[in-house]
Image (tube, rainbow, N blue to C red):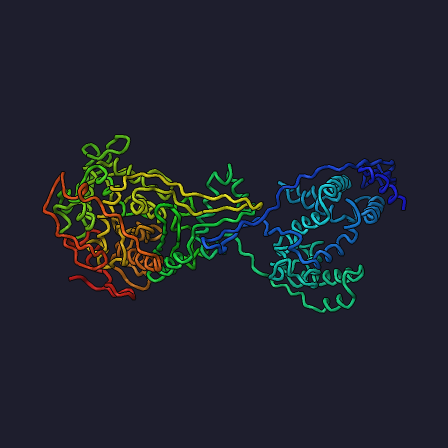
Amino acid sequence: MNVVRLLAAGTAAGVLTAAIALPAVGGVGLTAKSTTETLALRPENLDEPPLPERTEIYDSTGKQIAQFYYQNRESVKINQIAPVMLDAIISIEDVRFREHGAIDLEGTARALAKNVTGGGVVQGGSSITQQYVKLVQFNKAKTKKEAMAAIAPTLNRKLNELRYAMAIEEKYTKDQILEKYLNISYFGASAYGIQAAAKRFFGKPASELDLSEAATLAGAVQNPVRTDPTLGKTARDNLFKRRNLVLDTMAKYGKITPAEAEAAKKEKLGFKGTKIPGGCEESKYPYFCLYVKNEILTNPDFGATPEEREKRLQQGGLRIKTTLDPKMQQASETAIKKYVFAKDKPAAAQAMVVPGTGEIRAMAASRKFGDNRKKNETLINLAADSKHGGGVGFQQGSTAKAFTLAAAIENGWKLDDGNSTGKTYDVPAVDNTPFRDCKGLRVGSTHQVFNSSEGGGGFKTLRTGTLGSVNTFFMKLEEQVGLCKVVKMAEKLGIKRADGGKLQQVPTFTLGVNEMDPVTVANAFAVFAGRGQYCSPMAITEIRDRNGKITTAKPKCKQVMDEDVADAVTEVMSDVFTQGTMTEVGGIGRDAAGKTGTTDGYTAAWFAGYTPNLASAVSLGDPRGAFDHDLTNVTIGGRFYSYVYGATISGRIWKDSMLKSLRGVEPVSFTRYDAGKFGGCTKSCAPKPPKKDKDRDRDRGNPFGPPDDENPLDIWDNEDNGGTITPED
């Protein structure tokens, strides 16, 4: 064949030269058909960007919990592919692959002859190397126009393909080319690359494929859409025929015997359709997954632009190890389900954080994650801020009083210093307000702050005012300490609004009027547990890229409060379980401290607490709108409540989840506060309260009167099964 000889003549010198007669054909098709063109083809380097690979996310134990992908691909080495698969793909796609160079001379010459006389490209003849080049060009296309140009049936595209193929043959061994081809090829059914295809089609890795399975996948490469088994019976029939053709071809070229081919042809197609879950919707832990996803998408460490970060997540082939502890996650989910049903309109959410590192161990919510509103599902990360997929959050209520307490102690107040207030506190108008924000501007508006139970007025100390959560006491304390100092304290602890806006520096700041999320509140309380050390919330501990390079994330911590100040705050809040607003709920059998939070109008209910080695916050509110749908006269978890306070549900969720999370963990004691420095009083003294019982886990009455953010009615008893609703005498 003259064309074959002409093609062969130039290959030895590294230049492919062909004199091809191009006869005119009706004035259409290829140009210059009445002339003789000399084609001088030299190798040209091909840009080969990394293949899009799926990113996998793992919990702290190394178990996969989610994955993201633009193309479901998992590249493997050729020694991880069954030899029969290699034989099958070579037999059907390029039987002389290991014998020829960049071009299969016989196949290409035959195709060129038909294409020339046909007025266009009417026959393929591409070698596996040429096919690889075409797939690389197609994959790296950034626009639809570029993608179509990469597969356009034009002579110019074919000649460029040959140039690139020549360079590829010089650059790689045959095995390397075959490995790259099998990893880049699309097999249908959303499976890219041989490993993903083997798992998708047959539920096994590529190394375990048998003859029939290998022939099936080899047959799918030519037209993966026409043979996609997920598209119905016709497509499956097409795939079945292609498989049998591959088997016959393998027998023809001696890769298998005719008997083996016939036996394999009698087997069923065997498509399993193994699911390929992707995204947080398919994750077992969707809320934590959403947090990690948004951490990557918003953190410049993962790329300079949002587009770069999105591409790295979807295509980077990362292996991301996270801080999630499956034991603690399960404890949180179980506790929430016990008290709040998925169908309930009010929703509970919880986050657990490790003091001293900021590692997020658990993140859960009562609602199922999804977009089916009829089933009461949500796509909002109820446990996180808007930056991490959350919403606007809920007002944090009296948990914010902890910041005022800390600011007072930091500014010289002792634990028995206090003030005297009535049952109400009159917030003055701006002109007469004692409150100034951090710009020095007066802030205020005429209204009254009430205590939510009788007996809340009178003289209260830092101890008794906190344990009773007395609103008027904290308003006066904030006035005395200074609004800006309280705000600065909250900011040092990492407090920020869930919606990303600026904190509202208003007189009622101490009562928790700013909307928060559980991660932020839990992490702030972790500072007290960590003896004044603040650590940024941390969800990712390690990232391994596609090349095996490991990047380890380290905690980002700084000392924001003196250790002895934090110890004094803990000293006060540790009695909440025996003498304060959590008395009816009780402690957890080890050192713990915390603060309940009930908002004005019962729009939300919180509890935030900690041990030396774990901090947690639980929120409860109605995502439809807390002010329009408050927590009064509501049924939650199958129980009716006239009013919901911080201890009523959130406190119990916290207790149950912490008990299970810390089971088997050696108890650690809080550092004893400096009584010489913080004990007694200097500013405003009253008779010292009765000597405290240091057994933090024994229930006892509250000698300082009923708590102001907990109603003495509608409180459950201490039964482990959830208790019954009984009035307090």
Work out whether residue 348 can be spotted. Answer: yes
Q: Please state if 578 lies on the left or on the right of 347 as rendered.
A: left
Q: Is residue 657 above or below residue 116?
A: below
Q: Which residue is at the front of the view, 691 or 618?
A: 691
Quarter of the picture containing the C terminus is bottom left
Question: Where is residue 68 drawn, in percent x and y?
Answer: 53, 50
Work out whether residue 118 can be spotted. Answer: no
Q: Please state if 177 lies on the left or on the right of 110 as rendered.
A: left
**Residue at the image position 56 percent from the left and 59 percent from the top:** 275
Question: Where is residue 290 drawn, in percent x and y?
Answer: 45, 50
Total numbered labels placed on residues in the image: 0
Question: Where is residue 514 drawn, in percent x and y?
Answer: 30, 43
Most extreme residue toward the left, as rendered?
Answer: 687
Most extreme residue toward the top, as rendered?
Answer: 440
Q: Please state if 697 lies on the left or on the right of 459 as rendered.
A: right
Q: Is residue 417 above or below residue 351?
A: above
Residue 343 falls in image quadrant: bottom left
Residue 36 falls in image quadrant: top right
Question: Where is residue 163 drawn, in percent x and y?
Answer: 75, 39
